Image (cartoon, rainbow, N blue to C red):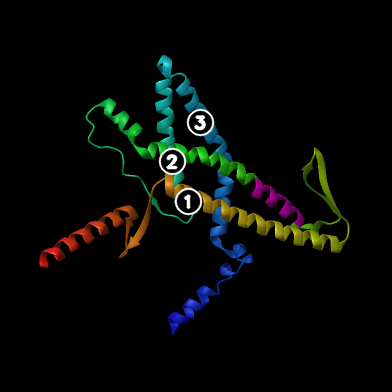
Amino acid sequence: MLRIIMDFISASSPSKLPVIGVLVDASTYKHLLYLLMALPLGFAYSALFSILVVGIALTVIGIGVLILLAALFITRGIARFERWLANQLLDVELDTYDDVATDTDSTFGDLTKYLEAASTWRGVGFLSMKFFIAVFALIPLFVLANGLSLLVAPLRYPYTARLGEVNDEPVRWSIETFPEALLAGLVGVVGILIMFHLANLSAYITRHMATALLGVEMSTVDGKTTSRTRQDTSSTTTGHTTNKYSHREK
């Protein structure tokens, strides 16, 4: 009976409400924080790609190889940070790829093993797409800034809200009366709701990007956290072994 009551309370949680549930959902604010961080990070990563391009262009004179190797090693470090950030803020659990060879016996082999690892180039792919997430982040952050400005209109009217520019002309809303201030506050609430849903949409897209490019998704089995791909491989192996013994018994 107690379990039924707890399930009912969980199902009726305010965060489960359609449209407005995002206001009280803790993950929404984690997604918003991720979006805020994506803006400067995405543009910073674009500078890293400029270094990669320079390295490729200068490979013909030798020094470009060193620049390219340095940029790729920096990319691996940033990909590790992005995997940690996704685990903290995007409701996902990713483990590192186990695709770097460990049986090299020379300095050259130590370098090439990272170049041959697919995880290196997956990290490059993720960081290249992170720039577009940063560009997309401008939209909800713009909506948030205007939404907050209008939300407090009932407390600060009369005033003129500036809502951006169209054809180099500022768009202003002159709020003079209390009904106008209430309407502006309502518009602000709607704008903030839209912003939260855009943040969740961005997190949904980025979560799938991270799962595909930054690491192996983890799952919990019998209280132990294991790699999903390793778990699937183990299950497949067990299934083949069971079938082999069943054939022998027949």
Tell me the quarter of the picture where residue 176 sits: bottom right
Residue at image x 52%, y 74%? 11
- Dot 2 or dot 3: first in sequence order is 3
| Span of residues in magenta | 139-150
Label 1 packing within 10 angstroms: few (<14), some (14-19), many (20+) = few
Give the residue type that dot 3 points to. Answer: Phe
- The N terminus lies in which quarter of the figure? bottom left
Residue pointed to by mark 2: 79
Of helix, strand and loop, which one carries label 2?
helix
Give the residue type that dot 1 points to. Answer: His
Residue pointed to by mark 3: 49
Give the residue type that dot 2 points to. Answer: Ala
Asked if 222 appears above or below 62 in the picture, the reply is below
Tell me the quarter of the picture where residue 117 sits: top left
User: Where residue 76 sits: x, y (%)?
Assistant: 41, 37
Q: Residue furthest left?
A: 249
Q: Which of the two residues, 250 or 203, is positioned nearer the viewer here?
A: 250
Residue at image x 43%, y 44%? 213
- Dot 1 or dot 3: first in sequence order is 3
User: Where residue 93 sits: x, y (%)?
Assistant: 41, 54
Residue pointed to by mark 1: 208
